[in-house]
Image (cartoon, rainbow, N blue to C red):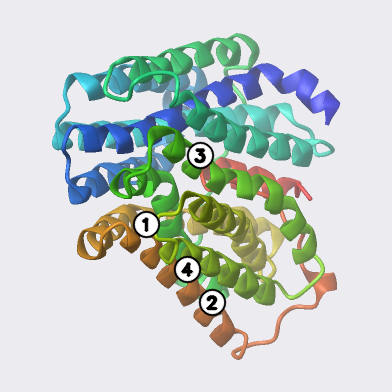
Amino acid sequence: MLSVLTNSWPLLFGMLLLMIGNGLQGTLLGVRGAIEGFSTFEMSIVMSAYFAGFLLASRMVPGMIRRVGHLRVFAALASIISAVIVIYPALPDPWVWTAGRVIIGFCFCGVYISAESWLNAAATNDNRGQALSLYMIVQVGGIVIAQALLLVADPAGFVLFVIPSVLVSIAVAPILLSASPTPAFEQTTPLSLAALFRVSPLGCVGMFLLGGVFAAQFGMGAVYGTQAGLSVPQISAFVAAFYLGAVFLQFPLGWISDRMDRRLLILITAAMGGAGAIVGLVSGGQFTALLVAATMIGGMTNPLYSLLIAYTNDYLTRDTMAGASAGLLFINGLGAILGPVITGWAMGLFGPEGYFLLIAILMFALVGYAAWRMTRRAAPSVADTNSYAPLSPTSTPVAAQAARAKPAV
């Protein structure tokens, strides 16, 4: 792993800055929206827009890269991100923010695809798994660090918007000055959704449900915090707890999944995530209980993302795994687009508790479906399953394809 870090540190450092910028602007908008007087429904539309842009880019950016190259795509999209972020405080209007979030989601997906392509090209079959593991740590670590930066200035001012804009601009330099501008790029052709569902109904349904949960975590966590009356430092810690749980539990659950029926582990993990949502639901807004709830939810849902991909791959040949992973990521994106809107509706109907209520419903729906699928067909033997590869929900199909080339665990 030291050799990977030595060779790829400029790329990883640049990605760290990008993730800090993305994590900060996402949480900041949830806080600033309340200051501007936006309704919960308006904020749910704003947050949903990011995932719409992300999903659109996953389909369009590969073609852009083939036409003009990684270098131009990366530089152009990063510059747009930097500009859009500073527009938010200048034009505090829900429709302007919605359009900005679509653009931001599109551009971040594009720079992720470019960076992941560079990382994949720089890695070898012997160290690709280590490179992906470091990349995942950088992604989660950047989002956690971003929550701490929320405390350095007043969310009602401009400074907290300037910081992510500057970070994104700086992030471009180490990546463009060190990475080859023309790594090989092969677009993954996903399986049709119908074919993918026939291969793994649990994988498809689980990914769709998780999309809603991830959108609630990443998009609506700060909105919940403002509605629940949390202070800015408390909101920062609450959002960070989701990702800290993932850091500690991703690899242990991955190790276990290679040694037992993955469907049973999916069921147990989803049940634990649902239990975490129940803790938040009955907490009465007590801050310590909210941290416990967020840690439990994040610690279970993030590994579930990789578990569902690994489980689906158990029924595939290696040459179809990358396409299946891309299809699953697309399904997850569809769920993520709907997640903030439904979460906002639930919070408008039931108050802040609607946030945890929706997460609980989605997680226990996955538990029920996994239990039903266990009665429909036998699990493959552990000896015949593929290795678990840890992936972040913010990864693109490029990272999924690289993970299939060399499992990370």
Residue 251 % position (x, y): 74, 51
Give residue 278's mark.
Answer: 4
Instruction: Decide if residue 185 is in sight here.
Output: no
Q: Which mark, by number, is residue 367?
A: 2
The residue that mark 1 highlights is: 334
Q: Please provide percent x and percent y for residue 209.
A: 44, 65
**Distance from label 4 to label 2 (Cα)?**
14 Å
Dot 4 and dot 1 residues touching (CB under 8 Å):
no
Distance between the alpha carbons at the discs numbered 4 and 1: 25 Å
Disc with the residue nearer the chain's start (4 vs 2): 4
Q: What amino acid type should be assigned to the residue bearing mark 2? A: Val
Query: Which of the two discs, 1 and 3, labels the residue nearer the N terminus?
Result: 3
Left or right side of 143 for 126 = right
Residue 18, image x and y in percent?
50, 25
* Quarter where residue 60 is shown: top left
Label 2 vs label 3: CA separation?
28 Å
Label 1 is placed on what type of residue? Leu
| As drawn, 192 above or below 198 | above
Q: Amino acid at mark 4?
A: Ile
Upstream in the sequence, badge 4 or badge 1? 4
Residue drawn 62% across and 49% down? 246
In space, the residues marked 2 and 1 are separated at their CA atoms by 20 Å
Mark 3, residue position = 237
Mark 3 is on which residue type?
Answer: Ala
**Residue 254 can be seen in this image:** yes
How packed mark 1 is, by other alpha carbons closer than 10 Å (few <14, some 14-19, many 20 or more), is: some
Q: Residue at x 67, y 77 (%)?
A: 264
In front of the other: 352 or 340: 352
Classed neighbour count for the residue bearing mark 2: other residues with Cα under 10 Å, few (<14), some (14–19), many (≥20): many
Question: What residue is shown at x 35% (from left), y 59% (from top)?
Answer: 355
Q: Earlier in the sequence, mark 2 or mark 3?
A: 3
CA gap between label 3 and label 4 equals 19 Å
